[in-house]
Amino acid sequence: MKKFLALLLALVMVFALAACGESTTEPSTAPTTEATTEPSAEASTEPSDNAEAADFTTVEEGKLIMSTNAAFPPYETTDDTGAVIGIDPEIAALIAEKLGLELVIDDVDFDSALLAVQQGKADMVMAGVTVNEDRLAVMDFTTSYATGVQVVIVPEDSDITDMDGLEGKLIGCQRGTTGYIYASDTPENGGYGEENVVAYDNGITAVEALKNGQVDAVIIDNGPAKEFVEANPGLKILETPWVEEEYAIGLSKADSADALNEAINNALQELIDDGTVQSILDKYITAE
Ligand code: GLN
């Protein structure tokens, strides 16, 4: 049922975006000129080689503010210097370059990252954000650039072997995520009941709680799950993948953001069409 819903949503989304990007989503045959898109203060008011870019406004002039939660490797994490690195910042940097804007990354909790866009504090949220019905009611989304699957992490010696084995167990999730939303749903709706799910600030603290025996399992997206299990011996991912999802860039629903949203979506579409997004995904996610 959940899989069906997720698939349905993905289809709806593709149609919605196809409709709004109709006239502008043709893959350009000419390579985009990287050298001419240096960020500059007046770039957003100057006509550029990206025609749609001419009349958009951003939260701060000349800047593209991306909110994120940098505790979700390989999509976003921090390096030794505290800089946010990963799939999302790499794609965002290329979008900013295409739009002639300076990328500014705001690293906050996941639920705050979603809110920042809704409250006009950020131009976009990239945080491995799953498109779902509730979020579509309060945000716009670009076309999807990646897929994720909710998976279960357990200790290697756990007696939990499948989704049914989670019944009556304590499950850790990250606050505000789809994993939390599904897991805390009622058993009639395929969840495990709110009383059986503990919300943590981020995936890393949920995994710490699992290692300390405070929860029996963690439900989280497969990308970070793989990284957390690799970094923490004694944990494993169950073979049973749960809900499949589409990741997209979350955008403001305000009319004033329409032109920027279209420019962001077009830039992303170009990066998908010319294979750039796939090569970034391949670089971070080792195929099995
Ligand atoms: N894909 C999940 C969601 O959108 C988790 C994202 C995250 O934790 N950064 O809810």
Image (spheres, rainbow, N blue to C red):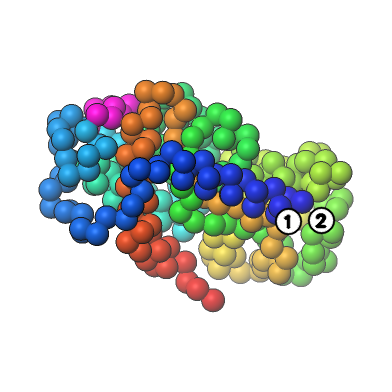
Q: Residue at x 47, y 66 (%)?
A: 285
Q: Position of residue 112 (x, y in %)?
A: 51, 32
**Viewer-side residue, 36 vs 72:** 36
* 120 w.r.t. 100: above or below: above
Q: Which residue has dot 1 on it? A: 217
* Residue type, numbered disc 2: Leu
Q: Is mark 1 within 8 Å of ligand 1?
A: no
Res 243 quadrant in image = bottom right
Q: Residue at x 57, y 64 (%)?
A: 226
Q: Residue at x 57, y 35 (%)?
A: 136
Verify CB contact (< 8 Å) between mark 2 and mark 1. yes
Q: Position of residue 94 (x, y in %)?
A: 29, 51
**Viewer-side residue, 35 vs 208:** 35
Q: Which residue has dot 2 on it? A: 166
Q: How would you classify the magenta stretch by its main secondary structure?
A: loop
What is the span of residues highlighted in magenta in the rendered image? 55-62
Is residue 191 visible from the viewing direction of this image?
A: yes
* 164 w.r.t. 101: above or below: below
